[in-house]
Every structure is written in structure tokens, then in C-alpha cells.
Image (cartoon, helix red, strand yellow):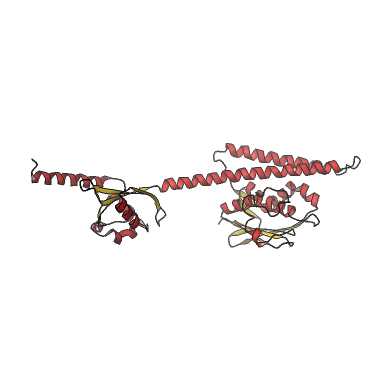
């Protein structure tokens, strides 16, 4: 028969085992009893949640703010009432993420829950990794959208040039050299797009083109050359007032921004009106502002709220896929800038692109 001294000794040994466990575990853990009194916590819990030894024996309600998680008391009570384990991903106000598990502490002989054990596993690195993966996926999708959009435009220009060639009289070939130059330019653009895709595919840092110091004058001239067939076809007037020209940015991305804005200005100008585009740039509050104004069809206020959404189009009768302005907005937003639009039906539009300048 077990003596009282033997029982006491066994309890002391069991308590020491429990103390050793709580002292040496690397996981933040707490023991809260049925009266919601804090009875024990592990050293990692002390570090993570700034707990002190004198908190032992205090109502958990009085120290709940240390966990910066407003519904923890309700969650504990739910486990006490149901006897079921609760698992939850939580974010504290110091921007750390934890996998929180609240386990019922059951007395089997009495078949009742006499408290809870709460464990916290820091999953901040895993959450940050997921965010990085989401960012890479976004960059990947943006790259594919940009390539699809950029390769479509020179193909369209080629088709436009071929249509003009078909209309030329047999003996009226004085414009043939200029048209041939447009074909060559379109082919060069397609080669560049494919070449950039191949280069990017095999770079060590996939989809991460390097920024370089760019001159806005050169980018605009490059875009005008790429859009030469449309500019000649519509007899477009382009005026410039570039007061600030230098910015460190990815060449392809800046070129895509300017290309889409000018191309849209031409496309969305009524056929019976000569397109007039005014490009200007200036510095403002740490941004290089690139403004592209036109005399096109303009748009209602309601349309201005949705034009930056993917596949959104102002006029379904005008050729396009609704990707151009989405690309512009996405590229600019990812670089810390913004795009604004001011437009009125029948009076054209002004797009202002705010590109963040480095210190």
C-alpha cells in the first residue's frame, strides 16, 4: 500500500518534471487555470510577451494587453467551455505572426477541463516568405502581360503598313522607302521583345531587370519611332516640354509607360479629329511627374475609376485589350509612385505619372 509520504514524494517529482519542462522548452507556452489565473509560463513567453515572474497568480485579464491580441480571453473561454483545441494564426501589433494553439487541460478522473495550455509558434518568417512569393508571382504576371502587350503593338503596326502598301498605285511608290522603314522598325521591336524575354528568362534574378539612369528625351524619341506608323497614319502632332529628364528606372518599364499613354492618346481620338499630344515633365515633392495630355474623346468620372483595372476599356469599338493602363498603373505603383487622370468627355484627357525619385 502506498504511504502518504510516497504520494507526496511522487507529486514532488511530478512537479519537478513539469518545472523542468516549462523551464527548458523553446516554445512560448502559458498555463491558465479554470479561474483564468496565470499559473506558469516558459522563458520564451517571458521574452516574446514581456512577462514577469510577479505575474504568476494574477488574473489573465489583467495582463492580456501584453499579447496585443484582443480576442484571446474569448478564445480561452471557448476552449474551456467546449473542451476542443483551438488553432489560429494571429498577428500582434508589433507586426509579428504566430500560430496560436489553445489546448484544454483536462483532469481525466473528474472528466473536466481545469484550465488551458496556450502555445505560440512564431511564423513571421514563413508569412514573409509567402509575401515574397506573391510579389514574384505579381512580377511574373506583369512581365507576361507586358510582353504580350508590347509584341501585339508592332504586329498591329505591321498590319497597318501592309494595308497602306495595298492601297498604293502601281506607279506611285515614292512612299515605299518610308513604309519599308516602318516594317523594319516593327520587326526590330518584336526582336527586342523576344530578346528581352530570353535574356530575362535566363538571368540569375528572374524577372528583376536592373534600374539605370535614363533620359526622358531618349525614351520619348524611342517610343515615337516605335509608333511611327500610327503617327504618320493619323498625322499626329506631338509637342514636348521636358523640364526634368533624368530618372533611375528600368528602361523597359519606363518605355512601356510612355508607349501606352501616347498610343492610347492616338487610339482614343475620334477619326475626324487630328490627334494633338502634349508631353511635359517636372519635379514635384520628390517625384518626377510625367504628364501626357491629349484632345481625344475623354471620359466620364465613372469611367475614370475603372480604367486602371485589367481588361477595362473606355470604348469597346476601339481596338485594344484593356491591358495598357493596367500595366502603367501596376508598374508605377510597384515603384512607389501613382497615376492620376483628369478628363472630360469630348475635351480629352490628362494623365499624370508620379515617378518616385531617389535621394
> In which quadrant of the rendered image does the C terminus lie?
bottom right
Q: Which residue occupies the foreground of this view, 269 or 245?
A: 269
Q: In this view, does 212 lie to the left or right of 50?
A: right
* The image quarter in which residue 163 lies: top right
Looking at the image, residue 57 lies above or below residue 147:
below
Q: Is residue 98 visible?
A: no
Residue 102 falls left or right of residue 155 = left
Rendered-image quadrant of the N terminus: top left
User: Is residue 53 positioned above or below 229 on the image?
Assistant: below
**At which x and y percent is residue 30?**
28, 51
Q: In which quarter of the image is residue 181?
A: top right
**Depth order, front residue of 35/67:** 35
Q: Tell whether 209 sits left or right of 164.
A: left
Across and down, in percent, residue 291 comes to 67, 59
Q: Provide residue 40's location: percent of width, then percent of height.
A: 25, 52
**Residue at x 32% of width, y 59% of height:** 64
| Residue 11 appearing in the image | yes
Q: Position of residue 313 (x, y in %)?
A: 67, 52
Amino acid at each position: 500500500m502506498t504511504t502518504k509520504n510516497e504520494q507526496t514524494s511522487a507529486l514532488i517529482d511530478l512537479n519537478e518534471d513539469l518545472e523542468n519542462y516549462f523551464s527548458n522548452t523553446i516554445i512560448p507556452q502559458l498555463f491558465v487555470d479554470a479561474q483564468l489565473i496565470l499559473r506558469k509560463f516558459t522563458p520564451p513567453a517571458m521574452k516574446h510577451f514581456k512577462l514577469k515572474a510577479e505575474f504568476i497568480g494574477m488574473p489573465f485579464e489583467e495582463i492580456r494587453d501584453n499579447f496585443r491580441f484582443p480576442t484571446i480571453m474569448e478564445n480561452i473561454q471557448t476552449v474551456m467551455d467546449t473542451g476542443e483545441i483551438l488553432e489560429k494564426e494571429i498577428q500582434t501589433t508589433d507586426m509579428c505572426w504566430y500560430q496560436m494553439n489553445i489546448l484544454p487541460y483536462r483532469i481525466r478522473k473528474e472528466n473536466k477541463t481545469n484550465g488551458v495550455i496556450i502555445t505560440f509558434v512564431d511564423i513571421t518568417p514563413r508569412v514573409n516568405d509567402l509575401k515574397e512569393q506573391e510579389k514574384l508571382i505579381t512580377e511574373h504576371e506583369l512581365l507576361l502581360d507586358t510582353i504580350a502587350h508590347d509584341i501585339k503593338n508592332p504586329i498591329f503596326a505591321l498590319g497597318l503598313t501592309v494595308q497602306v502598301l495595298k492601297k498604293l498605285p502601281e506607279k506611285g511608290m515614292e512612299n515605299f522607302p518610308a513604309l519599308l522603314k516602318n516594317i523594319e522598325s516593327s520587326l526590330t521591336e518584336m526582336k527586342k521583345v523576344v530578346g528581352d524575354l530570353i535574356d530575362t528568362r535566363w538571368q540569375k534574378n528572374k524577372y528583376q531587370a536592373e534600374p539605370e539612369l535614363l533620359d526622358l528625351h531618349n525614351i520619348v524619341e524611342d517610343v515615337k519611332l516605335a509608333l511611327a506608323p500610327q503617327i504618320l497614319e493619323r498625322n499626329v502632332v506631338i509637342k514636348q516640354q521636358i523640364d526634368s529628364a533624368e530618372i533611375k528606372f528600368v528602361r523597359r518599364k519606363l518605355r512601356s509607360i510612355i508607349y501606352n499613354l501616347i498610343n492610347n492618346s492616338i487610339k482614343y481620338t475620334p477619326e475626324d479629329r487630328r490627334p494633338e499630344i502634349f508631353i511635359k515633365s517636372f519635379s514635384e515633392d520628390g517625384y518626377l511627374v510625367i504628364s501626357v495630355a491629349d484632345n481625344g474623346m475623354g471620359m466620364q468620372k465613372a469611367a475614370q475609376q475603372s480604367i486602371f483595372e485589367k481588361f477595362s476599356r473606355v470604348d469597346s469599338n476601339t481596338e485594344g485589350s484593356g491591358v495598357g493602363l493596367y500595366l502603367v498603373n501596376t508598374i508605377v505603383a510597384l515603384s512607389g509612385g501613382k497615376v492620376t487622370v483628369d478628363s472630360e468627355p469630348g475635351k480629352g484627357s490628362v494623365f499624370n505619372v508620379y515617378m518616385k525619385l531617389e535621394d
